[in-house]
Image: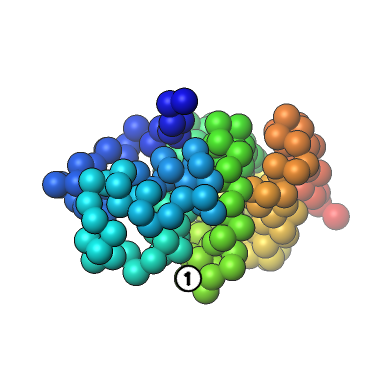
Amino acid sequence: MEMMTIPLSPDIAEPTSREDPHAAIVLKSRELFTHYGYSKTNIGDIAQECAMSPGNLYRYFKNKQAIGVAVVDNFMREEEMRTSAALVEASKEAEARLRAVITEGVMHTVEHLRQSPKIVELAEMICDCDEGVEMIQTHVMKRLSALQMIIADGVAAGEFHVVDTEAAARAVQMGTKFFHVPFAIARHGLDRVEEDLAVTLDLLCAGLRSRD
């Protein structure tokens, strides 16, 4: 059976081993992890796919976990690019932009899970290593900063009525946290995610608009 691969974002060029061995290893590992699963893929499989020896592969990554972290980082960068594009395309209203940035980020994960459910293993792995947890925290802080900026714009435009934009951004982030956890939404049911997220955003946005 032909190995299924998840396409990269159009803005991420597919590297060759001669151009960038590090990036080529990440790309080939991503293909293996998404098709066979993280647990069933070993260093030998990755080295063979990259047409190099395991010893040569260790020049670029200390172990499989480090490769997994790099693959997840690749996914996160794609999500950031997608949400940035959504902000550009959204209307000027703060609520529309808030909905767009959250929805696009969530649907990025949903679409990948539909193509390859095995990426859940990467999400579980990343939560079990210090480097992965630190990377997630950085990603979450970027998302929080974006939310705060949008909410602040909404306050300035008279759309939202909150005093503390940072606290409001944290509340929105916590209120949608579930939808950003791959293994949680996979178990919830991918076909329900978009509708349930919209209902959640309706409630959160109503709170931001409230004058009480």
Residue 172: quarter of image: bottom right
Question: Which residue: 59% across, 52% down?
Answer: 121
Question: Which residue: 47% across, 71% down?
Answer: 131
Percent position of residue 24, x then y: 27, 47
**Front residue of 19 and 4:** 4
Residue 11: quarter of image: top left
Percent position of residue 194, x then y: 70, 33
Q: Find the residue positioned furthest to the right.
A: 212
Judge the density around disc 1: few (<14), some (14-19), many (≥20) Cα neighbours within 10 Å.
some
**Front residue of 91 and 145:** 145
Q: Can residue 101 be seen by looking at this rendering?
A: no
Q: Find the residue positioned furthest to the top.
A: 1
Q: Can residue 211 be seen by looking at this rendering?
A: yes
Percent position of residue 112, x then y: 54, 36
Q: How is the image coloured?
A: rainbow
Query: What kind of element bears circle 1?
Result: helix
Residue 201: quarter of image: top right
Q: Is residue 168 above or below residue 48?
A: below
The residue tagged 1 is 131
Judged left or right of residue 195, residue 23 is left
Judged left or right of residue 34, residue 20 is left
Count of numbered marks: 1
Question: Which residue: 47% across, 25% down?
Answer: 1
Quarter of the figure with the C terminus:
bottom right
**Front residue of 119 and 207:** 119
Percent position of residue 169, x then y: 65, 58
Question: Which residue: 59% across, 64% down?
Answer: 127
Q: Find the residue positioned furthest to the bottom.
A: 130
Amino acid type of the residue tagged 1 in the rendering: Glu
Q: Is residue 128 above or below residue 123?
A: below
